[in-house]
């Protein structure tokens, strides 16, 4: 049986989807944008600031789903400019310092609200 997971500490879904879906011991997290919870605005700043907010949002959803950064097995990173890869990667490494998840990084033409980065994840549940 699938269970809808949501966190008030992450921005609400912008459309007909869930922040995450849990099924058995897996948690499928929707892409997170650099929006602070309770707002509809992008965080100010460069790719580093946006990546940090995205990963903080992802952490909130992971915790709500009974998981953590350490349990993430796969991420997909969407960037509007691959020239931002190194800066995004530096911030990403702060959240995933070891036992790195598998990852795909893709350049896209545009993201919602003009974001520079979006990240989704699949994780193992620990509770």
Image (spheres, grey):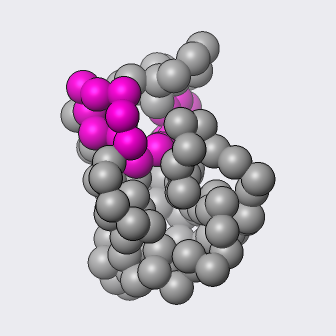
Name the image quarter holding the C terminus. Answer: top left
Front residue of 85/113: it is 113
Front residue of 24/81: it is 81
Q: Residue at x 45, y 81 (%)?
A: 87
Name the spot of residue 49 as percent of width and height, x first: 33, 63
Q: Residue at x 47, y 44 (%)?
A: 32
Q: Count up the numbered dots.
A: 0
Instruction: Specify the quadrant of the image occupied by residue 66.
Output: top left
Residue 56 appears in the figure: yes
Name the spot of residue 96 as percent of width and height, x first: 38, 74
Please, is residue 34 above or below residue 107 in the view?
above
Name the spot of residue 122 as percent of width and height, x first: 55, 51
Asked whether, in this view, residue 44 is left or right of residue 33, the answer is left
Please, is residue 85 above or below residue 80 in the view?
below
Q: Residue at x 61, y 72 (%)?
A: 102
- Magenta segment: does it hold 2? no
Residue extent of the magenta highlight = 20-42
Residue 1 appears in the figure: no
- Magenta segment: does it hold 32? yes
Name the image quarter holding the N terminus. Answer: top right
Front residue of 109/122: it is 109
Q: Residue at x 24, y 25 (%)?
A: 38
Name the spot of residue 97 as percent of width and height, x first: 34, 82
């Amino acid at each position: 049986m699938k269970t809808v997971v949501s966190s008030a500490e992450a921005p609400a879904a912008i459309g007909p989807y869930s922040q995450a879906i849990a099924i058995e011991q897996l948690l499928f997290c929707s892409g997170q944008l650099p929006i602070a919870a309770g707002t509809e605005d992008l965080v100010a700043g460069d790719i580093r600031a946006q990546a940090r907010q995205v990963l903080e949002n992802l952490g909130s959803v992971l915790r709500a789903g009974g998981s953590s950064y350490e349990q993430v097995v796969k991420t997909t990173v969407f960037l509007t400019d691959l020239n931002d890869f190194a800066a995004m990667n530096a911030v990403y490494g702060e959240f995933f310092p070891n036992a790195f998840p598998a990852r795909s990084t893709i350049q896209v033409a545009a993201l919602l609200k003009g974001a520079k980065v979006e990240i989704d994840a699949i994780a193992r549940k620990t509770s």
